[in-house]
Image (cartoon, rainbow, N blue to C red):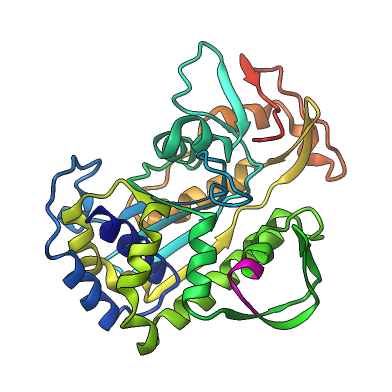
Amino acid sequence: MKIFKRIIIGLIVVLVIIGIALGVYVYQGKKALDSIDNNQTSVSQKINEGKPISVLLLGADTGADGRVDRGNSDTMMIVTLNPKTNSSVMYSIPRDTMAEMVGAGKNKKDVQKINAAYNIGKAKMAKNTVGELLGINVDYSVAINMAALKKTVDFVDGVTVTTPIKVSFDGITIPKGTHHLNGKQALTYVRMRYEDPRGDYGRQLRQQQVLKAVVKKLQQPQYLVKLPSLITTLGPDINTDLTDKQMETFPVKYHGAGKKMTSKQLQGQSAWINGSSYQILSNSTMQRASDKLRDNLGLKQQKLNNTETRLNKLNAEFFNNPDSTDYDTHGLDTTYYTDNTY
């Protein structure tokens, strides 16, 4: 029965995030959860109390190219849902963002690309790392691997997208223009990064494009009636730390949070650190995101003071010169790992 809870909460969170009314889908999802026992320990009571919450969405590269390990979180989105104001705020986080791995347990600060957090310390470290970066507590997480996307696109008989550029990756090419993609093609479409002139930011836009197309089709009656088969297929590909009871009450309490949706991208400045390319978020960029996220959580603004802001203060010249890629990391007691698999 755990298969049902993982996929239902994953899809419901996605539906809420992009501001689509749940309607009959909520009803069906709730029915499917009626027979599930609540036998987990809650990581947060906020859903039980109907308070504003934050959810970290992780798209891992497990399930692609035959990978079976946990993999990196190539997609990271932090979402806040406020049931009182019926509003949601979502930020996509660049995978190469420089960040301290919170909870690494070392004497020195372990600073890496932010997508390494999920690989090193699972969802817990990813939540703590994103929370420290943006000055919020991350309440819950939903992790979905690459295999889930391919299966879901095939389940809805493909999606139609319009691409402004040619996308070529892993032996598959999608020319510029409008195309109907199957699951394997959609996976290619959302994975290409280096050949996109917009880099990871372009990939994030393509991921959001496919996600919206999938959810739009999932609302159609011919797919709603077949959801049990999708649930069975995708169960192992989705993991979350919400309890059974929380997943049952989530759509009832938070379905209105998608009425007012704000979707943004965090964007940084490129730097080379010990031979690897990083994205450095400026203090003002992090602060603006923190302010918006905290506001939607009903919290007062709070000035950020973390490893990233302190390093940035030591690198004022880096931000004064947009063409500079030199970023000095020796001002704090830090250890940097530059393994390209991260």
Q: Position of residue 12 (x, y in %)?
A: 34, 67
Q: How many marks?
A: 0
- Residue 78 vs 217, above or below: the answer is above
Residue 105 falls in which quadrant of the image?
Answer: top left
- Is residue 80 a member of the stretch shown in magenta? no
- Residue 149 relative to residue 234: left or right: right
- Looking at the figure, which quarter contains the C terminus? top right
Q: Position of residue 91 (x, y in %)?
A: 52, 57
Residue 104 seen: yes
Residue at (57%, 67%) from the top-left corner?
208
Q: As drawn, which residue projects farthest toward the bottom? A: 221
- Residue 254 relative to residue 216: left or right: left
Q: Position of residue 288 (x, y in %)?
A: 54, 51
User: Front-most of 2 and 203?
Assistant: 2
Residue at (39%, 63%) from the top-left corner?
233
User: Front-most of 158 and 200?
Assistant: 158
- Residue 110 vs 94, above or below: the answer is above
Residue 335 falls in which quadrant of the image?
Answer: top right
Q: As drawn, which residue projects farthest toward the top? A: 107
Q: Main secondary structure of the magenta part?
A: helix
User: Front-most of 104 and 286?
Assistant: 104
- Residue 181 relative to residue 7: left or right: right
The magenta segment? 181-185
Residue at (19%, 53%) from the top-left corner?
244
- Residue 321 relative to residue 172: left or right: right
Q: Position of residue 182 (x, y in %)?
A: 61, 75
Residue at (46%, 35%) from the top-left corner?
132
Residue 84 seen: no
- Looking at the figure, which quarter contains the N terminus? bottom left
